[in-house]
Amino acid sequence: MSLLGTILRIELHDKIEICGRGYVLVETTASGYILARDDAKLRAEAFTYEEIWNYHLAGRLEIKRGSFSRATAALKLLSGVDSLDQLPEKERAFCLHAASCCDEFLRLHNEDPDTYCRTRPGYERAARVIGALKYSEAMERPHQASRSKRAAPAIDAAKERRARAGDPVTVLRAASGRNLERWVPTYEAHNLHPLALRKQHFRCGRSESPLQAEILAILARTAASYLDERRPSVPKLHRDMKAEIEKDNIKRAENGEPLLIVPSDKALTSTIKRKYTPFQIEAARKSIRSAERRFGVVSSGVDADWPGARVEIDESKLPIMTLLKSAGIWESLGDLKQELLRSVQRLWIVSAIDVATGVILGFVLTRNPGADALLSVLSLATRDKSAIVRGTGARSRWDMACGADTIATDAGAAVTSDDVRGAIIGMGSKNLIGPVGQPQLRGTKERFFGVVNTDLLAGYTGQTFSNPVVRGDYDSEARASIDGDDLALDIARWLVDVHHLTPSPAMRGETPIDRWRRLASTRGIVPPLNSNQRRVLFGIRVFRKPGPRGVVVLGNHYQSTDIQQYIRDTSDIPAEGLEISVDQHDLGAVSVRLGRDWYELPAMDETLDGIPLTLHVEAMRQMRVRFGDQAEVHAHVVHEARLAIRQRSEDAIAKAALGPTRPTEATVNRAEGSISIAITAREYSTSRASDQTDKMPLRFRTARSEQSVPTASSSELAKFSASPSTERDESSSDQQPSQPYWSVRE
């Protein structure tokens, strides 16, 4: 499917960033948008729909929906930040918890306004009910989380221990009646956004220094003396400053003037750090060359009229009995264990469907439809999935992706978790939670599950059917013909090659893919997240220490001018390092939190673009086995290893992507420890560095397609399969002096 005709919907109050430049919408025309620079509205520029789409494919477009609306501006003034991701983890958790308490009160008030009225007694009665509900949820949540499969298949992650009686459980105290009385009006006045409930403690503190003006002047003068090539120490400067103030105090005492207070050495140290950056201090006390060497940059160089208007997410238990692949394992189990497996080994499918077109935006197959599964589905809905379905044998592409104006879900515990609610809010979407026990309010999704059961699963033996009456004498166990992993691949292939290409009566005879094309080229789609936004919302959070080569994750170097500028200007880098977010589906870049904002760090190795985490870990393990203690390995050999594994294991990569395989920080750290490989690039291409500094518009530049992944020839793959002892051809090396190579160390 060609998406050159796709329109990204841009609304009046959206903030648009193209190649780092901010724009606002002026006018929408038949062929494109007229945008104005947000620093000077008279400087208008025209962008066609095709150009906007190409910017999105190239990763140079970011749309912050509703950023310039009156409600967003009022919310920013109240909370002091732009989004939940900018808050510390503790404050973010409190805002989401307080918002959930307000949501529960509004639900109770709508159901019984007389009992739970907006008076102090009404709020108190609601608080008691909400407290009991929160306690019940806290008692159930650990058992659900402990059964979640969080580790990726290619990473050896230890199994989590199942929660048992006597284990400690953390219960967040529910809001009191007085809290609800204060919170609910503020929550409603700011469009039910959790940021409105942020505590105002961040505004506390002195606005002015308690020190006298004369002391502040002396501190500034003494701090300037620290920037001297003689390198005076802070204790010496403090002694000199103290002597100067005491001498001045003698004269003040004689004249009857108030004495000056001698500031502490900590006040002097704080003044130095506040007034001068580490780069300035290093350059002044040593030399410019020393500062450049220390901080230098090492780089490679419920109506839905359009796609994304309403997305429904729900789960359904598939009526199929899945057995272990090895027939002998089932036979060796006793009757009691077999009976237990029959009750727990059913699979759930969690999926997201676009109501306007009937296109499935993403799905996962899992035994536990919890928060991890929902986050995986949301992540898939916002990305091109063609690379994933290549491993299923599908012939069509699955490149439909979009954001969402409204996400309709049920009221399950997974939806109300902090991670899921934070992700939906971060997408700029509204969460429409339907009443319990009324799936008809999500009719599009329920019809899809019915089609899955009748059209796809009818071809398989081994069904359990919906109840014993329907099943009759059918022996499900004896006729089981498929396992859960293969079923995920078959569902993906069926979605792409059958469901999306089959005319639907609900769409007046149009196929979902044709309807998507028509609406995308006429009404436009809700803009999907860019790669940086997706990593921030759905990525794996780890902490790494920065250095001249940027940060290192899983042996790969990630670098940009932003992080180097941050290192030069910041003296107090956290002891645990900077917070990094990694996309398990693409190691071509990571995101780093610098202050309150997140920035993208591209990988120094360009061949990492589109490489999933599991494939990279397996390639590094093979490098370790193949080369052992050998110090240097050419970069093309590492890349050929990845290509060879991809060709052999595309189905395994697809299985990992279609399950709730969301590795944690501990999982990534364990992977790094088990590989024990450090990769050091001796020579880099300059293209990555130019990407960081090239801010020229990408207009008329065609984005690289996912299909254009470099492939290795048969001769190249033969080199990878050769013996480790094969010597390098010196003449070939001389012909390619710029070929980068890697050092692989145990």
Image (spheres, rainbow, N blue to C red):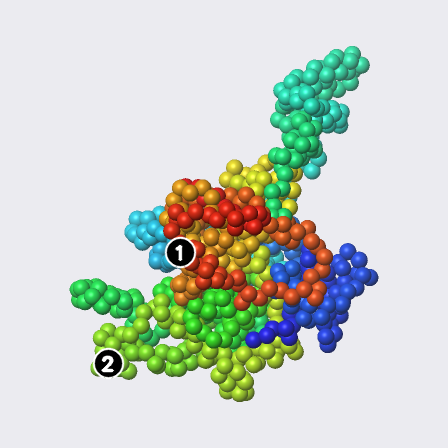
Instruction: Work out whether residue 10 or residue 670 is closer to the camera in this orientation and state it.
Output: 670
Residue at left offset 48%, top offset 61%: 712
- Residue 286 horizontal/vertical position (percent): 66, 27
Q: Secondary structure at mark 1?
A: helix
Q: Residue at x 76, y 67 (%)?
A: 46
Q: Where is residue 115 shown, x and y percent of the image? A: 49, 65
State the residue lying farthest toward the right. 42
**What is the quadrant of the N terminus in the image?**
bottom right
Residue at 45% in and 74% down: 394
The disc at residue 474 is 2
Q: Position of residue 743 (x, y in %)?
A: 48, 43
Q: Residues within 10 Å of mark 1 (few under 14, many from 20)?
A: few
Can residue 153 be seen in this snapshot? yes
Mark 2 lies on a secondary structure that is: loop
Percent of width and height locating residue 606? 56, 54
Quarter of the figure with residue 744: top left
Disc assigned to residue 721: 1
Q: Amino acid at mark 2?
A: Tyr
